[in-house]
Image (spheres, grey):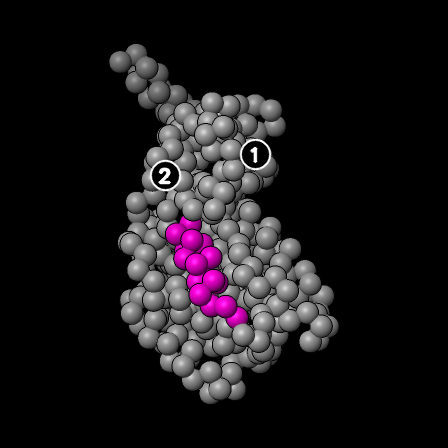
Amino acid sequence: MLHRYLLFFLAVAFPATVDSAAQDLLCLRRSLPLSIQDGRGLPIRGVAASDFEAKIHGAGIKILSLTPDDRPHRIVILLDASGSMQRNWFDEAVLASALAESRLPNVQMALLIFATDVEEKIDFSAGQHGVAERLRQIRTDAKKYSAKFGRGRTALYDALLEGVQLFGPSTSAADVLYLIGDGADNSSHTDFRELIRELTSRGIRLFMTGVVGPLGYRNRTPEESNGFSDMSELVAKTGGDMVVPFPNGVPMKPDWNAVGQVMNVFYLRMVQNYRLELELPLPLNKPRNWELKLAPARKDQWKDAVLKYPVQLLSCGDIP
C-alpha cells in the first residue's frame, strides 16, 4: 500500500520523472522473433528459455520467456519485375507460385510486383487462393508476361516499404516480407537506414530468395553486385533468412524437384519460429548489437544448430 501511495505522490509531484521511468521500463523489455534450425535447415521445436543465454557488450540479458509464435503469419510476396530480372522472370514466377500453392498452416498471403513503381498489388483480402491464381496465370503464360514485366529501373526499398503498408498498424500477427529477386536498387526514394528502422521497430522479418542470371551473360551493375550484401544486412537485422538456389545463375534446365525440396524447408522457417521476451540490463541510447547463443548444456545436443534473430537492438528513442 505504501508503494502505491509513493507512486501516486511521485506522479503528482514529478510527472516527468515517472514518465521517464515508464519509458525506460518499456525500453528494457523487448519482444523479438527467433528461429532455430538444425544442420539440414529444418526448424527445431521443443526448446525452452533455459536453453539459451544472451549478452550485450559483455553484460547479461535476462531471457524472460520463449514461446512458439502461434499468431497468424502474414506473408507479402514481392516480385522484382525490373529490367535486370527480364531473363529470370519465369523462374521468379515459379518460385513465388510454389509458396502461394503451399499448404503452410495459419498463413495469409499478399502479392506485390514492382519495378520503378508498383506494377500490381493483391492485398490480404483476396486470400492465398487469389495470390496463387494470379501467379499461376503469370507462370503459365510466360511469354505474355515477360513482355509486360521485366523492364524499367528497380525501386526495391520503396517496394519493401509499400509491402510494410499492406500489413497495416496491427501487431497481432507475425509478419514477413518475402523478396524474390537480385536485391539491386537503383531508383528508390526510401533511405536504407530508414527501411531497417521501419522493419525492426515493427518486428517484420525479411526473407529472400536470391535469383541472378548466368555468370557471363552480361556484366552486372554496381547495384546488382552490392544488392546481395545490402539485403543480407537487412535479413540479419530483422532476424529473417536468405536462400540462393542457383548461386552460379539459373541454368537453362533447372532441376525444379531438387529446388522444391530446398524451398519447402525454407518456407517452414518462415512460419515455425518463436517469440523471445528479453529484459535488458540498461536502456539503450543508440542501436546496439547483441549476442544470443545456446547454453553450454545444449551445445552438444544441437551442435549444428543455427540461430536467426534480429542482431541489432533499437535504441529507446527508435521504439514506436
The image position of residue 197, as x and y in percent, is 53, 49
Q: Residue at x 42, y 50 (%)?
A: 269
- 207 left or right of 48 in image: right
Q: Which residues are magenta?
A: 254-270
Q: Out of 216 and 186, give the one closest to the viewer.
A: 216
The image position of residue 192, as x and y in percent, is 60, 56
Q: Is residue 150 visible?
A: yes
Q: Which residue is mark 1?
A: 290
**Where 255 falls versus 47 (above or below)?**
below
Q: Which residue is mark 2?
A: 45
Q: Which part of the image, by quadrant, shows the N terminus?
A: top left
**Where 271 falls versus 178 (above or below)?**
above
Q: Identity of the amino acid at label 2?
A: Arg
Q: Residue at x 71, y 75 (%)?
A: 218
Q: Is residue 38 magenta?
A: no
Q: Residue at x 47, y 62 (%)?
A: 258
Q: Out of 240 and 165, give the one closest to the viewer.
A: 240
The image position of residue 147, as x and y in percent, is 52, 86
Location of residue 312 by image quarter: top right
Label 1–label 2 contact, CB within 8 A: no
**Where 154 falls versus 263 (above or below)?**
below
Q: Is residue 20 visible?
A: no
